[in-house]
Structures are given as C-alpha cells and as structure tokens.
Image (spheres, rainbow, N blue to C red):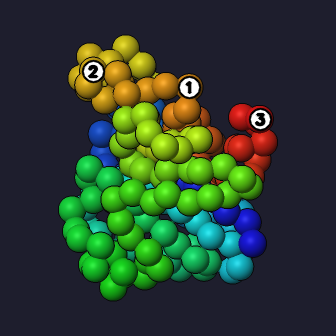
Amino acid sequence: MNVYLIADLHFEHEDMYTECGRPKGYEQKILKTIGNTVHSKDLLINLGDFCWKHDAHWHEQYMHYARCKNWLTIGNHDHHNAAWYIEHGWDWAGELCLIEYLGARILLSHLPQPDGDYDWNIHGHFHATDVKTQMEHEPEIVARLTPKHILIAMEHTNYQPVSLKKLLEKKG
C-alpha cells in the first residue's frame, strides 16, 4: 500500500484562477492525475479545503476517480461535520490526524499546527504563489511555521498527489 497526500483542491472556486494562477479546468486535471496515480490498495489523504460549492457533486466525482482508501482532514473551507463526509464516501474525516509512518510521528492537518510532539506537520492551507501576501493576511498562522512543517500545495505539486514515502525520503 502506498500513501499519497493532496491538499486544497478548492473545486469550483473561481478565485483560484486569479489568486493562484490555476488553469481552466483544473478540477478535471486533478481528478485525472488522482485516477492515474492512486490505486485501489493505496491510501489518499486529503489535507482539506476540498470544494467551494456543489459539495455532493464534487464528492461523487472525486470518489469515482479516487478508488482507494480516502481520509480527509477538514479544512477551514470544508463546511460539514465529519459524519457528513463519511456519508459521502470518506473512510475517515477529522480535524487532525497523528500517524506513525516509516519511524516518524507525522501530524496531518489543514492549517499548520503549533510546534508539538511530532517529527513533521504536513499541512495545506497556503497555496497562493505570493508568500508575502500570505504573511500579510495571516501572520499568526505564518508565525507557527518551523522547519518541521511541510506544505503540500497543488500549485507546487503539478496538481498531483504526493507520495508520503518519497516526501519523507527527501526530508531525510
């Protein structure tokens, strides 16, 4: 079983074109890369901010392509409770998830978390291409960042899921 990560899909969020430079039809690009990368025995962990509107429609589309185990860490733009997400196809949904993988304690979250008893905090949330803008709008969240934080952002992963194993191997 391979473990993959993805974050901030923001399906049907028009501001993603202007704010983040996403290409037209980015939703289909993401779905196709998921379908081509992740296999039935794999685990795909979504680090939140799944869609902007038409939630049930996008969950149905996503589950059609992501035919694997699916976990969701609920993001600040995910407006349902964990039970709703489970009812719509997720195998697990919650705010934070602490796992041990390849000997490392990994905290999975949407927002970067304060320093704590983990080796890595893999998170989403930041996806604007301009770091200065992020710092201006959310300085209290940016202030949490340490070398233990790893950002997964669609704009930096070519709209593809990231292998957790390869990510940790790069971090050493």
Q: Which residue is mark 3?
A: 172
Choose between 80 and 168: the one closer to the eye.
168
Total number of numbered discs in the rendering = 3
Residue 77 on image: x %, y %: 26, 52
Q: Which residue is mark 1?
A: 147
Mark 3 vs mark 2: which is more N-terminal? 2
Element class at badge 1: loop
Q: Are marks 2 and 1 in contact (CB under 8 Å)?
A: no
Residue 38: quarter of image: bottom right
Residue 141: quarter of image: top left
Q: Are marks 3 and 2 in contact (CB under 8 Å)?
A: no
Q: CA distance from mark 2 to mark 1?
A: 17 Å
Residue type at the position of mark 2: Pro
Residue 57 to residue 74: above or below: below
Element class at badge 3: loop
Please name which of the two marks, 3 or 2, marks the residue nearer to the observer.
3
Residue 103 placement, left or right of 77: right
> Looking at the image, which residue is at 71% across and 44% down?
168
Residue 40 to residue 13: above or below: below
Residue 139: which numbered mark, if any? 2
Choose between 153 and 106: the one closer to the eye.
106
Residue type at the position of mark 3: Gly
Element class at badge 2: helix
Please name which of the two marks, 2 or 1, marks the residue nearer to the observer.
1
> Looking at the image, which residue is at 59% across and 51% down?
105
Q: Is residue 77 visible?
A: yes
Q: CA distance from mark 3 to mark 2?
A: 29 Å
> Looking at the image, which residue is at 35% across and 66% down?
94
> Looking at the image, which residue is at 30% across and 45% down?
14
Residue 133 on image: x %, y %: 32, 18
Quadrant that contains the C terminus = top right
